[in-house]
């Protein structure tokens, strides 16, 4: 791929990333929050390595993918060049993919059921590799969406910690598309706080400012950095 292949509608990801950083600082100032701005996970799903490399070369290290198989093809060569990058799995995890996921990702954000928690614990033992772990919460209680129901969150978090000995780092959510995100973000932050978990992964291109104001530790930003994704 040459530069001319991604033309006017494909923005410079480094410039876009700087804009997102500035937006986050501004949103926190506006809210009178003195907290550190959230980490920015650049969500690179569907985008080829050529679009990702400029960000790595510019010093950015945190990325997100939602499919294990796509990540397995794209990221090992990038990691060879940039061993200190941090790759987050932000899409649903099937139990037959846990081996690959534990081997490939530095953080897995989508633990949402006992079977997956058990399989991840077994892989961590086997591989001697321990990715950071988040539990996905289905704050909107949508039937088709992955994640633990909010009222089941505390118990599931305890089970992960006590029964499976998983060192959880945080919680993540994807609010319903047709609702204001703020109540969902507030709920997620509360679940994190009462369970003593520092990680709060919430906010995407359309709502990362609000997420920052409500206490996100990580925002997951795709199109605002890389431009629109082709349908797949
Ligand atoms: C694709 C995706 C994002 C990024 O979405 P944008 O709207 O492009 O920023 C964030 N989180 C998850 C779980 C995703 O699948």
Image (cartoon, rainbow, N blue to C red):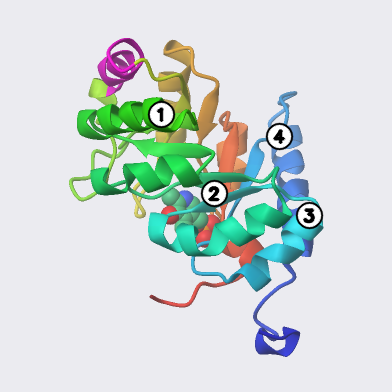
Q: Earlier in the sequence, mark 1 or mark 2?
A: 1
Identify which residue is drawn at 45% across, 21% down: 192
On residue 124, the disc is 1
Q: Find residue 42 and report its horizontal and vertical position in percent.
A: 61, 53
Q: Which of the image's four quarters has the N terminus?
A: bottom right
Q: Is residue 67 visible?
A: no
On residue 18, the disc is 3
- Callout 1 environment at 10 Å: few (<14), some (14 to 19), or many (20+)? some
Provide the residue designation for mark 4: 37
Determine the CA span between mark 1 and mark 2.
Answer: 34 Å
- Callout 3 environment at 10 Å: few (<14), some (14 to 19), or many (20+)? few
Q: Earlier in the sequence, mark 1 or mark 4?
A: 4
Would residue 113 be found to the left or right of residue 102 on screen?
left
Residue 70, placed above or below residue 38: below
Determine the CA span between mark 3 and mark 1.
Answer: 36 Å
User: Disc 1 or disc 2, which is closer to the eye?
Assistant: 1
Q: Is 48 in the magenta?
A: no
């Amino acid at each position: 791929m040459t530069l001319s292949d991604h033309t006017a509608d494909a923005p410079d990801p480094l410039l876009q990333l700087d804009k997102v950083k500035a937006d986050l600082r501004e949103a926190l100032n506006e809210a009178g929050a003195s907290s550190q701005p959230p980490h920015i996970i650049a969500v690179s799903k569907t985008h080829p390595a050529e679009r990702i490399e400029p960000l790595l070369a510019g010093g950015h290290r945190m990325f997100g993918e939602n499919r294990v198989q796509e990540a397995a093809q794209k990221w090992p060569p990038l990691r060879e060049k940039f061993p200190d990058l941090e790759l987050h799995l932000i899409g649903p995890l099937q139990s037959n993919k846990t081996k690959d996921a534990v081997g490939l990702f530095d953080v897995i954000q989508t633990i949402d059921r006992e079977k997956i928690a058990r399989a991840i614990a077994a892989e961590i033992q086997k591989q001697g590799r321990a990715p950071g772990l988040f539990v996905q919460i289905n704050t909107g209680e949508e039937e088709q969406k992955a994640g633990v129901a909010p009222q089941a969150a505390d118990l599931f978090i305890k089970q992960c910690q006590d029964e499976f000995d998983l060192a959880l780092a945080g919680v993540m959510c994807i609010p319903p598309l047709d609702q204001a995100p703020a109540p969902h973000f507030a709920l997620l932050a509360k679940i994190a706080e009462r369970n003593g978990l520092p990680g709060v992964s919430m906010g995407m291109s359309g709502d990362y400012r609000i997420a920052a104001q409500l206490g996100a530790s990580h925002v997951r930003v795709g199109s605002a950095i890389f431009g629109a994704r082709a349908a797949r």
